[in-house]
Image (tube, rainbow, N blue to C red):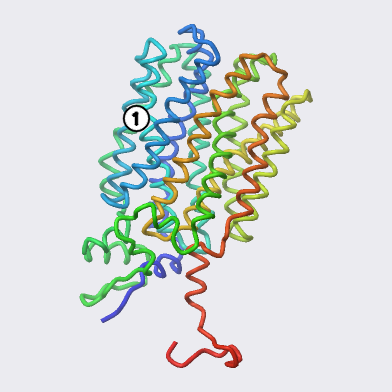
């Protein structure tokens, strides 16, 4: 009887067509997720004019989706470890597609806020699930690169929203960019057919034949035998993935630091995505120019995400992430000062790389930190707690915009969380991560006076 370690099998395999398929579906879902998330910021000036909404109330309208995302990340992230990741992803896609499209029918701020809250459940819930899926199936040596490459689809969705927004809003009104968000519904049957299920989930339910098929696709060198027995490390067999596992084995303090880092980063991300267009329009740029800044922001996010992932696979991901927070603090602060337009474009690109890109690398780090069985739960709670920062940002910046403060004070308010986030990341105890503990578990045991030699029978 052969004993197949599923975690080791995924770690040591080489990138192949199966990995490409998982990457394709996860990235495509994130593209639509990013579109749904960005579309409100793109349409916000038109919505405010159409409904006669003041900046403070507009902040609450934007935050309604973010409030939904907080609940979606926590509950739909956690439930995936119970019902399976594939079904959780499908539920999320259905939610954000139907209710983002429904927002186009809203005629008042309250109705708009309600349907955006419901869309937010799906937008928030899908993120921890696709990150957990990509992390589980990625080869260890390129895991951060693949996760950040996948999550760069978020920036692609933002770019599509900006490009469509420039044409559709002027021609058909702001509602049209929301109607377009219903398209992902046609993907649901294909996701159910082609997206693989989580391996620990299949193992826990005794679905051995499905595991053999996935294992043979994951590693073409593996030839299944009838007597094969699949196993995962003890930490990956946590029954039901309750939240208490996030605080066990010395992970408690680091879990709180992840929550703090996510809060600060998501504050920056949603402050920019919700108010950049309005801030730049208020600084004297036309709507078309302000939307171009959104394109540059998301293009920078793609570079930051992919570049950050590449660096994280070659250097220590914790310190790469801390450096990205530091870059965010610098670039956001400088955005508040007058400068030539080419320099402004560079700074906005750097801001996108170090805010949206930083969040994507933070997702990758969190996915690596927790054991496989509680990965979606850990990331879901980090995103859920972090959403409170995302909820606060549009409201707070909306209040500041309504006070007609100088531009640099608005951007300073967005930059301060970057410093706090950097400190939180530096305080994370990487030695308690799942990857570090697996390395420790694989080291031979030694005793004093044994000169470092492996003990007999270890």
Q: Nearer the viewer, residue 46 or 431?
A: 431
The residue sitting at 39% across, 24% down in the picture is 116
| Element type where label 1 sits in the image | helix
The image quadrant of residue 176 is top left
Q: Is residue 400 at least partly visible in the picture?
A: yes
The residue sitting at 47% across, 11% down in the picture is 171
Residue 425 is situated, as x and y percent measured from the top left of the image, at 61, 51
Q: Is residue 420 left or right of residue 338?
A: left
Residue 65 is situated, as x and y percent measured from the top left of the image, at 42, 27
Q: Residues within 10 Å of mark 1 (few under 14, many from 20)?
A: many
Above or below 418: residue 10: below
Q: Is residue 186 left or right of residue 256?
A: left
The image quadrant of residue 304 is top right
The residue sitting at 30% across, 55% down in the picture is 240
The residue sitting at 69% across, 38% down in the picture is 329
Q: Nearer the viewer, residue 221 or 43?
A: 43
The image quadrant of residue 68 is top left
Q: Quadrant of the C terminus?
A: bottom left
Name the residue beneath numbered marker 1.
97
Above or below 410: residue 130: below
Q: Is residue 17 at least partly visible in the picture?
A: no
Q: How many marks?
A: 1
Q: Quadrant of the N terminus?
A: bottom left
Residue 362 is situated, as x and y percent measured from the top left of the image, at 54, 48
Q: Is residue 302 left or right of residue 39?
A: right
């Amino acid at each position: 009887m052969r004993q197949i370690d599923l975690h080791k099998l995924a770690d040591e395999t080489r990138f192949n067509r199966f990995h490409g398929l998982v990457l394709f579906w996860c990235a495509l879902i994130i593209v639509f997720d990013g579109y749904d998330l960005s579309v409100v910021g793109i349409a916000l000036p038109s919505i405010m004019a159409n409904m006669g909404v003041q900046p403070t109330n507009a902040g609450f309208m934007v935050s309604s989706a973010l409030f939904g995302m907080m609940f979606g990340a926590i509950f739909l992230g956690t439930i995936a470890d119970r019902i399976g990741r594939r079904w959780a992803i499908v539920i999320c896609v259905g939610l954000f597609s139907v209710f983002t499209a429904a927002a186009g029918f809203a005629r008042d701020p309250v109705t708009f806020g309600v349907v955006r809250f419901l869309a937010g459940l799906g937008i928030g819930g899908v993120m921890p699930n696709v990150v957990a899926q990509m992390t589980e199936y990625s080869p260890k040596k390129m895991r951060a690169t693949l996760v950040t490459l996948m999550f760069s689809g978020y920036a692609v969705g933002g770019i599509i929203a900006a490009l469509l927004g420039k044409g559709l809003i002027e021609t058909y009104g702001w509602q049209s960019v929301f109607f377009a968000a219903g398209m992902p519904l046609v993907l649901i049957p294909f996701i159910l057919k082609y997206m693989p299920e989580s391996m620990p989930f299949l193992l826990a339910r005794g679905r051995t034949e499905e595991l053999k098929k996935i294992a043979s696709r994951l590693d073409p060198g593996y030839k299944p035998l009838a007597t094969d027995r699949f196993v995962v490390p003890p930490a990956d067999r946590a029954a039901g993935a309750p939240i208490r596992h996030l605080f066990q084995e010395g992970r408690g303090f680091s879990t709180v630091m992840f929550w703090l880092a996510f809060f600060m980063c998501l504050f920056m991300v949603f402050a920019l995505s919700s108010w950049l267009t309005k801030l730049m329009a208020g600084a004297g740029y036309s709507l078309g120019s302000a939307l171009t800044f959104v394109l540059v922001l998301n293009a920078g996010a793609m570079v930051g995400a992919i570049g950050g992932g590449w660096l994280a696979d070659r250097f220590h991901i914790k310190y790469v992430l801390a450096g990205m927070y530091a870059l965010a603090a610098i670039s956001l602060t400088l955005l508040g000062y007058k400068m030539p337009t080419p320099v402004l474009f560079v700074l906005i690109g750097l801001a996108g790389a170090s805010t949206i890109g930083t969040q994507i690398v933070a997702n990758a780090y969190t996915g690596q930190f927790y054991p496989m069985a509680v990965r979606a739960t850990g990331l879901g709670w980090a995103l859920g707690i972090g959403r409170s920062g995302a909820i606060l940002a549009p409201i707070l910046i909306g209040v500041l915009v309504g006070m007609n403060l100088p531009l640099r004070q608005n951007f300073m308010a967005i930059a301060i969380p970057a410093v706090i986030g950097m400190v939180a990341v530096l305080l994370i105890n990487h030695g308690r991560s799942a990857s570090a503990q697996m390395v420790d578990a694989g080291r031979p045991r030694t005793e004093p006076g044994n000169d470092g030699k492996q003990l007999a029978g270890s």
